Amino acid sequence: MRIATVLLAAGMLASVALAQPKPQPKPRRKPRKPRNAAWAVTKMPKDKVICFALWTLHKNVLKLTAQLYELDADAPRTVRLEVKTDGKWTKVAEAKVIERGWTATFRVDKWDSTRDRVYRVAHGDGAFYTGTIRKDPVDKETIVVAAFTGNSNANRGPRTDLIANIKTQDPDLLFFSGDQVYDHGRHFPAWLLFGRQFGEIIKDRPTIAIPDDHDVGNGNLWGAAGKPGHGGYRDPEFIKEVERAQTSNLPDPFDPTPIQRGIGVYYTALTWGRIGFAVIEDRKFKSQVDVLKDIDRTGLQFVRADHIQKFDVDPKIVDVPQAKLLGERQLTFLRHWAADWRGTDMKAVLSQTVFVGAAHLHGGRGSRLLADLDCNGWPQTGRHKALQEMRKGFALMIGGDQHLATVIHHGVEDWDDSGYSFCVPSIMNYYNRWWKPLEPGGNRPEGPLEHTGRFKDGFGNRLTMHAYANPDPKRKKYGRWGARAAGHGIIRFNKTTRKITMECWPRGVDVSNRQHKQFVGWPVTISQEDNYSRKAVAYLPTLDVSGRTNPVVQVIDESNGEIVYTLRIRAATYRPKVFKVGKYTVKVGRGDTVKTLKGIQSVGPDSKATLNVAF
Protein backbone atom coordinates (compact mmCIF):
# COMPACT_ATOMS: atom_id res chain seq x y z
CA MET A 1 0.00 0.00 0.00
CA ARG A 2 2.74 2.41 0.99
CA ILE A 3 4.66 1.66 -2.27
CA ALA A 4 1.54 2.21 -4.39
CA THR A 5 0.83 5.53 -2.66
CA VAL A 6 4.39 6.73 -3.25
CA LEU A 7 4.25 5.77 -6.92
CA LEU A 8 0.88 7.51 -7.34
CA ALA A 9 2.21 10.67 -5.69
CA ALA A 10 5.31 10.60 -7.86
CA GLY A 11 3.18 10.26 -10.97
CA MET A 12 0.99 13.20 -9.95
CA LEU A 13 4.05 15.35 -9.35
CA ALA A 14 5.47 14.37 -12.72
CA SER A 15 2.15 15.27 -14.40
CA VAL A 16 2.10 18.67 -12.71
CA ALA A 17 5.69 19.27 -13.71
CA LEU A 18 4.96 18.39 -17.34
CA ALA A 19 1.88 20.57 -17.38
CA GLN A 20 3.77 23.67 -16.20
CA PRO A 21 5.41 25.92 -18.79
CA LYS A 22 9.17 25.59 -19.11
CA PRO A 23 11.11 28.43 -17.47
CA GLN A 24 12.46 30.87 -20.00
CA PRO A 25 16.25 31.28 -20.04
CA LYS A 26 17.50 34.58 -18.70
CA PRO A 27 18.69 36.97 -21.37
CA ARG A 28 22.48 36.61 -21.80
CA ARG A 29 24.45 39.54 -20.56
CA LYS A 30 26.73 41.29 -22.93
CA PRO A 31 30.20 39.99 -22.07
CA ARG A 32 32.29 42.45 -20.12
CA LYS A 33 35.49 43.70 -21.56
CA PRO A 34 38.19 42.53 -19.13
CA ARG A 35 40.17 45.20 -17.35
CA ASN A 36 43.72 45.68 -18.59
CA ALA A 37 42.97 43.25 -21.42
CA ALA A 38 46.30 44.07 -23.05
CA TRP A 39 48.14 42.10 -20.38
CA ALA A 40 47.50 38.83 -22.22
CA VAL A 41 48.87 40.02 -25.58
CA THR A 42 51.33 37.44 -26.88
CA LYS A 43 51.58 38.42 -30.55
CA MET A 44 52.48 41.75 -32.09
CA PRO A 45 53.03 43.18 -35.58
CA LYS A 46 56.36 42.17 -37.06
CA ASP A 47 57.93 45.58 -36.34
CA LYS A 48 57.14 45.24 -32.61
CA VAL A 49 57.99 41.60 -31.90
CA ILE A 50 60.74 42.40 -29.34
CA CYS A 51 59.22 42.99 -25.90
CA PHE A 52 62.27 43.69 -23.69
CA ALA A 53 65.76 42.51 -22.77
CA LEU A 54 67.65 41.60 -19.59
CA TRP A 55 71.44 41.95 -19.36
CA THR A 56 74.39 41.63 -16.99
CA LEU A 57 78.07 42.43 -17.45
CA HIS A 58 80.59 40.49 -15.36
CA LYS A 59 84.37 40.48 -15.82
CA ASN A 60 84.02 41.85 -19.38
CA VAL A 61 81.49 39.19 -20.41
CA LEU A 62 78.13 40.55 -21.55
CA LYS A 63 75.09 38.27 -21.41
CA LEU A 64 71.78 39.58 -22.74
CA THR A 65 68.48 37.76 -23.14
CA ALA A 66 65.98 39.18 -25.62
CA GLN A 67 62.33 38.42 -24.89
CA LEU A 68 60.19 38.23 -28.02
CA TYR A 69 56.49 37.95 -28.63
CA GLU A 70 55.28 34.85 -30.48
CA LEU A 71 56.59 34.93 -34.04
CA ASP A 72 54.65 34.15 -37.20
CA ALA A 73 55.43 30.86 -38.87
CA ASP A 74 57.38 32.54 -41.70
CA ALA A 75 59.28 35.01 -39.48
CA PRO A 76 63.07 34.68 -39.08
CA ARG A 77 64.20 32.58 -36.11
CA THR A 78 67.32 34.63 -35.39
CA VAL A 79 67.91 38.01 -33.76
CA ARG A 80 70.93 40.29 -33.86
CA LEU A 81 72.71 42.30 -31.20
CA GLU A 82 74.10 45.54 -32.58
CA VAL A 83 76.04 48.43 -31.05
CA LYS A 84 76.37 51.99 -32.23
CA THR A 85 79.89 52.97 -33.26
CA ASP A 86 80.64 56.35 -34.87
CA GLY A 87 76.95 56.78 -35.63
CA LYS A 88 76.58 53.42 -37.35
CA TRP A 89 75.10 50.14 -36.15
CA THR A 90 77.48 47.18 -36.09
CA LYS A 91 76.45 43.58 -35.44
CA VAL A 92 78.39 42.02 -32.57
CA ALA A 93 76.42 38.80 -32.10
CA GLU A 94 73.56 36.73 -33.45
CA ALA A 95 71.37 34.27 -31.55
CA LYS A 96 68.71 31.71 -32.38
CA VAL A 97 65.21 32.10 -31.01
CA ILE A 98 64.04 29.30 -28.71
CA GLU A 99 60.39 28.90 -29.56
CA ARG A 100 59.27 27.58 -26.19
CA GLY A 101 59.17 30.90 -24.37
CA TRP A 102 60.42 32.91 -27.39
CA THR A 103 63.80 33.96 -25.99
CA ALA A 104 67.24 34.47 -27.49
CA THR A 105 70.39 34.81 -25.38
CA PHE A 106 73.57 36.54 -26.47
CA ARG A 107 77.04 36.14 -24.99
CA VAL A 108 79.80 38.57 -25.94
CA ASP A 109 83.28 38.00 -24.49
CA LYS A 110 85.88 40.77 -24.14
CA TRP A 111 83.23 43.47 -23.86
CA ASP A 112 84.71 46.93 -23.16
CA SER A 113 83.27 47.65 -19.71
CA THR A 114 84.99 51.05 -19.38
CA ARG A 115 82.39 53.01 -21.39
CA ASP A 116 78.68 53.18 -22.04
CA ARG A 117 77.54 51.52 -25.26
CA VAL A 118 74.20 52.07 -26.97
CA TYR A 119 72.83 48.73 -28.15
CA ARG A 120 69.83 47.43 -29.99
CA VAL A 121 68.28 44.01 -30.46
CA ALA A 122 67.15 43.62 -34.07
CA HIS A 123 64.76 41.15 -35.69
CA GLY A 124 64.18 41.06 -39.43
CA ASP A 125 64.31 44.41 -41.17
CA GLY A 126 62.16 46.55 -38.93
CA ALA A 127 61.92 45.38 -35.31
CA PHE A 128 64.32 47.05 -32.88
CA TYR A 129 64.69 47.35 -29.11
CA THR A 130 67.24 49.94 -27.95
CA GLY A 131 68.99 50.58 -24.64
CA THR A 132 72.37 51.29 -23.06
CA ILE A 133 74.92 48.86 -21.66
CA ARG A 134 76.39 50.97 -18.89
CA LYS A 135 80.05 50.95 -18.04
CA ASP A 136 81.06 49.11 -14.90
CA PRO A 137 80.82 51.83 -12.20
CA VAL A 138 84.08 50.83 -10.49
CA ASP A 139 84.95 54.49 -9.81
CA LYS A 140 81.67 55.41 -8.11
CA GLU A 141 81.97 55.88 -4.37
CA THR A 142 78.45 54.56 -3.68
CA ILE A 143 76.80 51.72 -5.58
CA VAL A 144 72.99 51.75 -5.45
CA VAL A 145 70.84 48.63 -5.73
CA ALA A 146 67.06 48.74 -6.16
CA ALA A 147 65.35 45.58 -4.87
CA PHE A 148 61.81 44.32 -5.51
CA THR A 149 59.59 41.31 -4.81
CA GLY A 150 56.01 40.15 -5.36
CA ASN A 151 54.74 41.78 -8.58
CA SER A 152 51.24 40.31 -8.27
CA ASN A 153 49.34 40.19 -11.55
CA ALA A 154 46.06 40.65 -9.70
CA ASN A 155 46.68 44.26 -10.67
CA ARG A 156 47.72 44.27 -14.30
CA GLY A 157 48.09 48.01 -14.72
CA PRO A 158 51.28 50.03 -15.16
CA ARG A 159 53.67 50.69 -12.27
CA THR A 160 53.89 54.41 -13.03
CA ASP A 161 54.75 55.64 -9.52
CA LEU A 162 57.39 52.96 -9.03
CA ILE A 163 59.06 53.56 -12.39
CA ALA A 164 59.18 57.34 -11.79
CA ASN A 165 60.84 56.82 -8.40
CA ILE A 166 63.42 54.38 -9.77
CA LYS A 167 64.33 56.84 -12.50
CA THR A 168 64.88 59.48 -9.84
CA GLN A 169 66.95 57.18 -7.61
CA ASP A 170 68.88 55.93 -10.68
CA PRO A 171 70.20 52.65 -9.23
CA ASP A 172 73.25 50.91 -10.66
CA LEU A 173 71.66 47.43 -10.41
CA LEU A 174 68.11 46.06 -10.31
CA PHE A 175 67.27 42.95 -8.28
CA PHE A 176 63.89 41.18 -8.55
CA SER A 177 63.90 38.47 -5.88
CA GLY A 178 60.95 36.47 -7.21
CA ASP A 179 57.24 36.30 -7.96
CA GLN A 180 57.63 38.53 -10.97
CA VAL A 181 54.73 36.46 -12.35
CA TYR A 182 51.70 35.28 -10.35
CA ASP A 183 49.61 33.67 -13.08
CA HIS A 184 50.18 29.99 -12.40
CA GLY A 185 50.82 28.07 -15.59
CA ARG A 186 50.61 31.26 -17.69
CA HIS A 187 54.16 32.44 -17.37
CA PHE A 188 54.58 33.64 -20.96
CA PRO A 189 51.83 36.31 -21.18
CA ALA A 190 52.39 37.43 -17.59
CA TRP A 191 56.17 37.63 -18.16
CA LEU A 192 55.56 39.79 -21.22
CA LEU A 193 53.42 42.04 -19.01
CA PHE A 194 56.29 42.26 -16.50
CA GLY A 195 58.54 43.38 -19.35
CA ARG A 196 56.09 46.06 -20.45
CA GLN A 197 55.78 47.28 -16.86
CA PHE A 198 59.51 47.46 -16.08
CA GLY A 199 61.24 47.49 -19.47
CA GLU A 200 61.75 51.24 -19.29
CA ILE A 201 64.22 50.88 -16.40
CA ILE A 202 65.51 47.40 -17.23
CA LYS A 203 66.84 48.26 -20.69
CA ASP A 204 69.60 50.51 -19.32
CA ARG A 205 70.66 48.67 -16.15
CA PRO A 206 72.04 45.25 -15.25
CA THR A 207 69.15 43.20 -13.92
CA ILE A 208 68.98 40.08 -11.77
CA ALA A 209 65.55 38.43 -11.79
CA ILE A 210 65.32 35.07 -10.04
CA PRO A 211 62.12 33.01 -10.17
CA ASP A 212 60.32 32.00 -7.01
CA ASP A 213 57.33 29.74 -6.37
CA HIS A 214 54.63 31.68 -8.22
CA ASP A 215 56.88 32.18 -11.25
CA VAL A 216 57.00 28.40 -11.71
CA GLY A 217 53.31 27.79 -11.05
CA ASN A 218 53.51 26.78 -7.36
CA GLY A 219 51.90 28.26 -4.29
CA ASN A 220 55.01 27.35 -2.32
CA LEU A 221 58.21 25.73 -3.53
CA TRP A 222 60.44 23.07 -2.00
CA GLY A 223 62.56 22.04 -4.97
CA ALA A 224 64.25 19.03 -3.33
CA ALA A 225 66.94 19.01 -6.07
CA GLY A 226 64.31 18.32 -8.73
CA LYS A 227 62.45 15.51 -7.01
CA PRO A 228 58.69 15.56 -7.80
CA GLY A 229 56.35 15.68 -4.85
CA HIS A 230 54.64 18.02 -2.38
CA GLY A 231 55.66 21.55 -3.39
CA GLY A 232 58.25 20.27 -5.87
CA TYR A 233 58.84 21.30 -9.45
CA ARG A 234 56.14 20.20 -11.87
CA ASP A 235 56.71 20.01 -15.63
CA PRO A 236 60.52 20.15 -16.10
CA GLU A 237 60.20 21.68 -19.57
CA PHE A 238 58.07 24.49 -18.15
CA ILE A 239 60.67 25.10 -15.42
CA LYS A 240 63.39 25.31 -18.07
CA GLU A 241 61.31 27.82 -20.01
CA VAL A 242 60.83 30.03 -16.95
CA GLU A 243 64.47 29.90 -15.89
CA ARG A 244 65.66 30.51 -19.45
CA ALA A 245 63.50 33.64 -19.63
CA GLN A 246 64.45 35.02 -16.22
CA THR A 247 68.03 33.87 -15.59
CA SER A 248 69.88 33.10 -18.83
CA ASN A 249 71.26 36.66 -18.77
CA LEU A 250 73.15 35.90 -15.54
CA PRO A 251 76.87 35.06 -15.47
CA ASP A 252 77.61 31.37 -15.97
CA PRO A 253 76.61 29.21 -12.98
CA PHE A 254 79.27 28.14 -10.49
CA ASP A 255 78.55 24.47 -11.22
CA PRO A 256 76.20 23.95 -14.19
CA THR A 257 75.43 20.28 -13.43
CA PRO A 258 71.63 19.85 -13.78
CA ILE A 259 69.53 18.53 -10.92
CA GLN A 260 67.00 15.70 -11.26
CA ARG A 261 64.83 15.50 -14.40
CA GLY A 262 67.30 17.66 -16.32
CA ILE A 263 66.35 20.92 -14.59
CA GLY A 264 69.21 23.42 -14.76
CA VAL A 265 70.76 25.66 -12.12
CA TYR A 266 71.74 29.34 -12.16
CA TYR A 267 73.40 30.09 -8.81
CA THR A 268 76.35 32.31 -9.59
CA ALA A 269 78.48 35.34 -8.74
CA LEU A 270 78.30 38.82 -10.25
CA THR A 271 80.73 41.67 -9.57
CA TRP A 272 79.46 45.14 -10.43
CA GLY A 273 80.95 48.44 -9.29
CA ARG A 274 83.38 46.44 -7.08
CA ILE A 275 80.45 44.97 -5.11
CA GLY A 276 80.43 41.18 -5.15
CA PHE A 277 76.97 39.60 -5.37
CA ALA A 278 76.22 35.92 -4.76
CA VAL A 279 72.99 34.87 -6.47
CA ILE A 280 71.62 31.76 -4.80
CA GLU A 281 68.65 29.44 -5.34
CA ASP A 282 67.39 29.01 -1.82
CA ARG A 283 64.38 26.88 -2.80
CA LYS A 284 65.87 24.66 -5.48
CA PHE A 285 67.55 22.20 -3.10
CA LYS A 286 65.28 22.74 -0.08
CA SER A 287 63.63 19.60 1.30
CA GLN A 288 59.91 19.11 0.86
CA VAL A 289 57.71 19.27 3.94
CA ASP A 290 56.88 15.57 3.73
CA VAL A 291 60.37 14.99 5.16
CA LEU A 292 58.50 15.51 8.45
CA LYS A 293 55.96 12.76 7.85
CA ASP A 294 57.51 10.39 10.40
CA ILE A 295 58.00 12.84 13.28
CA ASP A 296 55.98 12.60 16.48
CA ARG A 297 53.43 15.39 16.11
CA THR A 298 52.36 15.35 19.74
CA GLY A 299 52.38 18.98 20.86
CA LEU A 300 52.34 20.35 17.31
CA GLN A 301 49.38 22.09 15.71
CA PHE A 302 49.63 22.19 11.91
CA VAL A 303 47.12 24.55 10.28
CA ARG A 304 48.21 23.15 6.94
CA ALA A 305 51.26 21.22 5.71
CA ASP A 306 53.61 24.21 6.03
CA HIS A 307 52.01 26.31 8.78
CA ILE A 308 52.54 25.48 12.45
CA GLN A 309 50.29 27.42 14.78
CA LYS A 310 51.53 26.05 18.08
CA PHE A 311 54.56 24.35 19.59
CA ASP A 312 54.14 22.65 22.96
CA VAL A 313 57.47 20.92 22.39
CA ASP A 314 61.00 21.93 21.47
CA PRO A 315 60.84 23.37 17.91
CA LYS A 316 63.99 21.41 17.09
CA ILE A 317 61.68 18.44 16.54
CA VAL A 318 61.13 19.65 12.95
CA ASP A 319 64.89 20.04 12.35
CA VAL A 320 65.22 16.46 11.17
CA PRO A 321 68.73 15.34 10.09
CA GLN A 322 67.73 14.57 6.49
CA ALA A 323 66.26 18.05 5.86
CA LYS A 324 68.28 20.31 3.53
CA LEU A 325 68.14 24.01 2.77
CA LEU A 326 70.77 25.23 0.30
CA GLY A 327 72.36 21.82 -0.19
CA GLU A 328 76.06 21.03 -0.25
CA ARG A 329 76.60 22.39 -3.76
CA GLN A 330 75.51 25.89 -2.84
CA LEU A 331 77.32 25.83 0.50
CA THR A 332 80.51 24.99 -1.41
CA PHE A 333 79.80 27.90 -3.76
CA LEU A 334 79.30 30.33 -0.86
CA ARG A 335 82.52 29.12 0.75
CA HIS A 336 84.49 29.87 -2.43
CA TRP A 337 82.70 33.15 -3.05
CA ALA A 338 83.23 34.48 0.48
CA ALA A 339 86.99 33.90 0.12
CA ASP A 340 87.33 35.43 -3.38
CA TRP A 341 87.77 39.22 -3.23
CA ARG A 342 89.24 39.85 -6.67
CA GLY A 343 87.89 43.20 -7.86
CA THR A 344 85.62 43.41 -4.82
CA ASP A 345 85.34 45.83 -1.89
CA MET A 346 82.03 44.70 -0.32
CA LYS A 347 79.69 41.71 -0.64
CA ALA A 348 75.99 40.85 -0.63
CA VAL A 349 73.93 37.65 -1.02
CA LEU A 350 70.80 37.85 -3.19
CA SER A 351 68.17 35.24 -2.37
CA GLN A 352 64.49 34.59 -2.87
CA THR A 353 63.75 35.07 0.81
CA VAL A 354 65.54 35.63 4.13
CA PHE A 355 66.83 33.16 6.68
CA VAL A 356 64.34 33.62 9.50
CA GLY A 357 60.59 33.52 10.18
CA ALA A 358 59.44 37.07 10.92
CA ALA A 359 55.69 37.10 10.22
CA HIS A 360 53.38 36.42 13.18
CA LEU A 361 50.08 37.20 11.45
CA HIS A 362 49.31 35.83 7.98
CA GLY A 363 46.50 37.16 5.82
CA GLY A 364 44.58 38.90 8.63
CA ARG A 365 45.02 40.27 12.12
CA GLY A 366 43.34 37.23 13.66
CA SER A 367 45.46 34.58 11.99
CA ARG A 368 48.43 34.17 14.30
CA LEU A 369 51.10 31.78 13.09
CA LEU A 370 54.08 30.46 14.98
CA ALA A 371 56.21 28.99 12.20
CA ASP A 372 56.11 28.90 8.41
CA LEU A 373 58.08 26.11 6.73
CA ASP A 374 58.13 28.21 3.54
CA CYS A 375 60.61 30.68 5.07
CA ASN A 376 64.34 30.04 5.28
CA GLY A 377 64.20 29.71 9.06
CA TRP A 378 63.54 26.02 8.39
CA PRO A 379 65.29 23.66 8.48
CA GLN A 380 67.28 25.24 11.30
CA THR A 381 70.53 23.33 10.74
CA GLY A 382 70.49 24.26 7.05
CA ARG A 383 69.82 27.86 7.99
CA HIS A 384 72.75 27.92 10.39
CA LYS A 385 75.11 26.42 7.81
CA ALA A 386 74.13 29.04 5.24
CA LEU A 387 74.62 31.96 7.65
CA GLN A 388 77.99 30.60 8.79
CA GLU A 389 79.27 30.61 5.20
CA MET A 390 77.88 34.05 4.34
CA ARG A 391 79.30 35.78 7.38
CA LYS A 392 82.82 34.67 6.43
CA GLY A 393 82.56 37.24 3.62
CA PHE A 394 80.88 39.95 5.77
CA ALA A 395 77.91 39.84 3.37
CA LEU A 396 74.61 41.65 3.65
CA MET A 397 71.62 39.48 2.70
CA ILE A 398 68.89 40.88 0.43
CA GLY A 399 65.66 38.98 -0.27
CA GLY A 400 61.90 39.24 -0.51
CA ASP A 401 58.83 36.96 -0.68
CA GLN A 402 57.57 37.52 2.87
CA HIS A 403 55.09 40.36 2.11
CA LEU A 404 56.68 42.10 5.10
CA ALA A 405 59.67 44.42 4.93
CA THR A 406 62.22 43.87 7.71
CA VAL A 407 65.81 44.59 8.69
CA ILE A 408 67.08 41.77 10.91
CA HIS A 409 70.44 40.97 12.48
CA HIS A 410 70.79 37.19 12.48
CA GLY A 411 72.24 34.97 15.17
CA VAL A 412 73.37 31.35 15.17
CA GLU A 413 75.29 30.46 18.33
CA ASP A 414 74.43 33.84 19.90
CA TRP A 415 72.43 36.90 19.00
CA ASP A 416 73.98 39.14 16.32
CA ASP A 417 76.89 36.81 15.52
CA SER A 418 76.02 36.68 11.81
CA GLY A 419 74.90 39.06 9.06
CA TYR A 420 72.08 41.51 8.52
CA SER A 421 69.23 40.88 6.12
CA PHE A 422 66.94 43.30 4.32
CA CYS A 423 63.65 41.75 3.23
CA VAL A 424 62.09 44.25 0.83
CA PRO A 425 58.34 44.95 0.60
CA SER A 426 56.13 43.52 -2.11
CA ILE A 427 55.38 45.60 -5.18
CA MET A 428 51.73 44.55 -4.87
CA ASN A 429 50.65 43.23 -1.47
CA TYR A 430 47.32 41.39 -1.54
CA TYR A 431 48.25 39.02 1.30
CA ASN A 432 49.09 41.08 4.38
CA ARG A 433 51.50 39.93 7.08
CA TRP A 434 52.51 41.52 10.36
CA TRP A 435 55.43 41.35 12.77
CA LYS A 436 53.68 41.45 16.14
CA PRO A 437 55.32 39.40 18.93
CA LEU A 438 53.34 38.70 22.09
CA GLU A 439 56.21 39.73 24.37
CA PRO A 440 58.68 42.63 24.22
CA GLY A 441 62.13 41.97 22.86
CA GLY A 442 65.37 42.10 24.80
CA ASN A 443 68.04 44.75 24.29
CA ARG A 444 65.57 46.97 22.49
CA PRO A 445 67.38 49.70 20.53
CA GLU A 446 66.20 53.29 20.65
CA GLY A 447 63.75 54.18 17.92
CA PRO A 448 60.11 54.81 16.99
CA LEU A 449 59.09 51.16 16.47
CA GLU A 450 57.60 49.23 19.37
CA HIS A 451 58.56 45.63 18.58
CA THR A 452 62.31 45.84 18.06
CA GLY A 453 65.09 44.02 19.89
CA ARG A 454 66.11 40.41 20.42
CA PHE A 455 63.66 37.59 19.80
CA LYS A 456 63.49 33.97 18.70
CA ASP A 457 61.35 33.01 15.76
CA GLY A 458 58.98 30.04 15.86
CA PHE A 459 61.82 27.67 15.01
CA GLY A 460 64.00 28.94 17.86
CA ASN A 461 66.31 30.95 15.59
CA ARG A 462 67.88 34.04 17.12
CA LEU A 463 67.07 37.39 15.52
CA THR A 464 67.35 41.06 16.41
CA MET A 465 64.60 43.12 14.78
CA HIS A 466 65.74 46.62 13.76
CA ALA A 467 62.92 47.70 11.43
CA TYR A 468 59.63 46.34 10.09
CA ALA A 469 56.78 47.73 7.96
CA ASN A 470 53.41 46.35 8.98
CA PRO A 471 50.27 47.22 6.99
CA ASP A 472 48.80 50.42 8.43
CA PRO A 473 45.62 52.23 7.29
CA LYS A 474 47.15 55.54 8.46
CA ARG A 475 49.32 55.47 5.35
CA LYS A 476 46.28 55.75 3.06
CA LYS A 477 47.48 59.25 2.21
CA TYR A 478 49.96 57.40 -0.03
CA GLY A 479 47.16 55.36 -1.59
CA ARG A 480 45.96 51.79 -1.18
CA TRP A 481 49.36 50.19 -1.64
CA GLY A 482 51.14 52.41 0.85
CA ALA A 483 48.58 51.36 3.47
CA ARG A 484 49.19 47.70 2.62
CA ALA A 485 52.95 48.14 3.16
CA ALA A 486 53.82 47.71 -0.52
CA GLY A 487 56.91 49.37 -1.92
CA HIS A 488 60.55 48.77 -2.84
CA GLY A 489 63.97 48.77 -1.26
CA ILE A 490 67.12 50.76 -1.98
CA ILE A 491 70.54 49.65 -0.73
CA ARG A 492 73.54 51.98 -0.87
CA PHE A 493 77.04 50.51 -0.57
CA ASN A 494 79.57 53.23 0.26
CA LYS A 495 82.97 51.78 -0.64
CA THR A 496 84.93 54.59 1.04
CA THR A 497 83.31 54.41 4.48
CA ARG A 498 82.25 50.74 4.12
CA LYS A 499 78.79 51.74 5.31
CA ILE A 500 75.60 50.11 4.01
CA THR A 501 72.36 52.11 4.08
CA MET A 502 69.01 50.38 3.58
CA GLU A 503 66.01 52.45 2.50
CA CYS A 504 62.39 51.29 2.35
CA TRP A 505 59.98 53.33 0.23
CA PRO A 506 56.16 52.92 0.22
CA ARG A 507 54.17 52.82 -3.01
CA GLY A 508 52.53 56.14 -3.79
CA VAL A 509 55.29 58.40 -2.48
CA ASP A 510 57.34 60.74 -4.60
CA VAL A 511 60.96 60.21 -3.61
CA SER A 512 61.86 63.66 -4.96
CA ASN A 513 59.40 65.30 -2.52
CA ARG A 514 61.10 65.88 0.84
CA GLN A 515 57.71 65.81 2.55
CA HIS A 516 57.26 62.17 1.53
CA LYS A 517 58.97 59.78 3.91
CA GLN A 518 60.17 56.19 4.01
CA PHE A 519 58.47 53.60 6.18
CA VAL A 520 58.92 54.36 9.88
CA GLY A 521 62.20 52.88 11.12
CA TRP A 522 64.13 53.45 7.89
CA PRO A 523 66.75 54.24 6.74
CA VAL A 524 68.96 51.76 8.58
CA THR A 525 72.74 52.13 8.28
CA ILE A 526 75.28 49.51 9.30
CA SER A 527 79.00 48.98 8.88
CA GLN A 528 80.37 46.26 6.64
CA GLU A 529 81.94 44.44 9.59
CA ASP A 530 78.57 44.32 11.38
CA ASN A 531 77.82 41.39 9.07
CA TYR A 532 80.21 39.29 11.16
CA SER A 533 79.90 40.87 14.59
CA ARG A 534 80.54 37.63 16.44
CA LYS A 535 82.27 38.34 19.75
CA ALA A 536 86.01 37.83 19.73
CA VAL A 537 87.58 35.28 22.07
CA ALA A 538 91.10 36.46 21.21
CA TYR A 539 92.95 38.55 18.64
CA LEU A 540 95.94 38.27 16.36
CA PRO A 541 98.74 40.85 16.42
CA THR A 542 97.86 44.09 14.63
CA LEU A 543 98.83 43.99 10.97
CA ASP A 544 100.82 47.02 9.79
CA VAL A 545 100.78 46.88 5.98
CA SER A 546 103.07 48.96 3.73
CA GLY A 547 103.35 48.99 -0.04
CA ARG A 548 99.69 48.03 -0.64
CA THR A 549 96.47 49.97 -0.15
CA ASN A 550 93.28 48.27 0.96
CA PRO A 551 94.67 44.72 0.87
CA VAL A 552 92.66 41.56 1.43
CA VAL A 553 93.19 39.81 4.77
CA GLN A 554 92.34 36.13 5.16
CA VAL A 555 92.51 34.30 8.49
CA ILE A 556 92.87 30.48 8.53
CA ASP A 557 92.55 28.28 11.61
CA GLU A 558 95.60 25.98 11.62
CA SER A 559 93.89 23.42 13.87
CA ASN A 560 91.46 22.42 11.10
CA GLY A 561 92.58 24.31 7.97
CA GLU A 562 89.28 26.19 7.73
CA ILE A 563 89.03 29.80 6.61
CA VAL A 564 87.72 31.87 9.50
CA TYR A 565 86.91 34.86 7.30
CA THR A 566 88.19 37.00 4.43
CA LEU A 567 87.89 40.80 4.21
CA ARG A 568 89.29 43.67 2.17
CA ILE A 569 90.41 46.19 4.77
CA ARG A 570 90.33 49.94 4.13
CA ALA A 571 93.38 51.06 6.08
CA ALA A 572 97.06 50.28 6.53
CA THR A 573 96.47 48.62 9.89
CA TYR A 574 94.05 45.92 10.95
CA ARG A 575 93.63 43.82 14.08
CA PRO A 576 92.08 40.44 13.18
CA LYS A 577 89.71 38.94 15.72
CA VAL A 578 89.46 35.17 16.24
CA PHE A 579 86.97 33.00 18.05
CA LYS A 580 89.22 30.59 19.87
CA VAL A 581 92.74 30.62 21.25
CA GLY A 582 95.27 28.97 18.93
CA LYS A 583 97.58 29.38 15.97
CA TYR A 584 96.52 30.89 12.68
CA THR A 585 97.76 31.51 9.15
CA VAL A 586 97.20 35.03 7.84
CA LYS A 587 97.28 35.88 4.14
CA VAL A 588 97.63 39.54 3.18
CA GLY A 589 97.64 41.06 -0.29
CA ARG A 590 95.72 41.22 -3.51
CA GLY A 591 95.85 39.58 -6.91
CA ASP A 592 98.94 37.45 -7.40
CA THR A 593 100.92 39.26 -4.70
CA VAL A 594 100.11 37.71 -1.34
CA LYS A 595 102.17 37.47 1.84
CA THR A 596 101.52 34.34 3.92
CA LEU A 597 102.25 34.45 7.65
CA LYS A 598 102.07 31.06 9.38
CA GLY A 599 102.00 29.97 13.00
CA ILE A 600 100.62 33.27 14.31
CA GLN A 601 99.64 32.79 17.94
CA SER A 602 96.49 34.51 19.19
CA VAL A 603 96.89 37.15 21.90
CA GLY A 604 94.66 38.78 24.48
CA PRO A 605 92.67 41.98 23.97
CA ASP A 606 95.26 44.11 25.78
CA SER A 607 98.23 42.94 23.72
CA LYS A 608 100.08 45.56 21.66
CA ALA A 609 101.88 43.06 19.45
CA THR A 610 102.35 44.11 15.81
CA LEU A 611 103.20 42.28 12.60
CA ASN A 612 104.83 44.35 9.84
CA VAL A 613 103.77 43.23 6.36
CA ALA A 614 105.86 44.97 3.69
CA PHE A 615 105.39 44.63 -0.09
Image: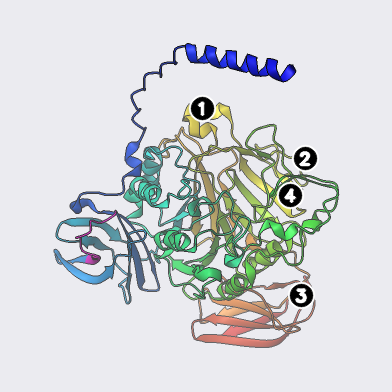
Instruction: Report the Cα–Cα distance between label 4 and label 2.
Output: 13 Å
Q: Earlier in the sequence, mark 4 or mark 2?
A: 2
What is the magenta range?
A: 70-82
Q: Which residue is mark 3?
A: 607
Task: Decide if residue 274 is in sight here.
Answer: no
Q: Is residue 440 above or below residue 499?
A: above
Q: Earlier in the sequence, mark 2 or mark 1?
A: 2
As shown in the figure, which amino acid type bears the numbered disc 3?
A: Ser
Instruction: Report the Cα–Cα distance between label 2 and label 1.
Output: 28 Å
Q: Position of residue 73 (x, y in %)?
A: 23, 59
As shown in the figure, which amino acid type bears the numbered disc 1?
A: Lys
Say which of marks 4 and 2 sits in front: 4
Rendered image: mark on residue 570: none
Q: Which residue is mark 1?
A: 476
Task: Decide if residue 509 is in sight here.
Answer: yes
Residue visible at 63% across and 44% down? 467
Q: Earlier in the sequence, mark 1 or mark 3?
A: 1
Say which of marks 3 and 2 sits in front: 2
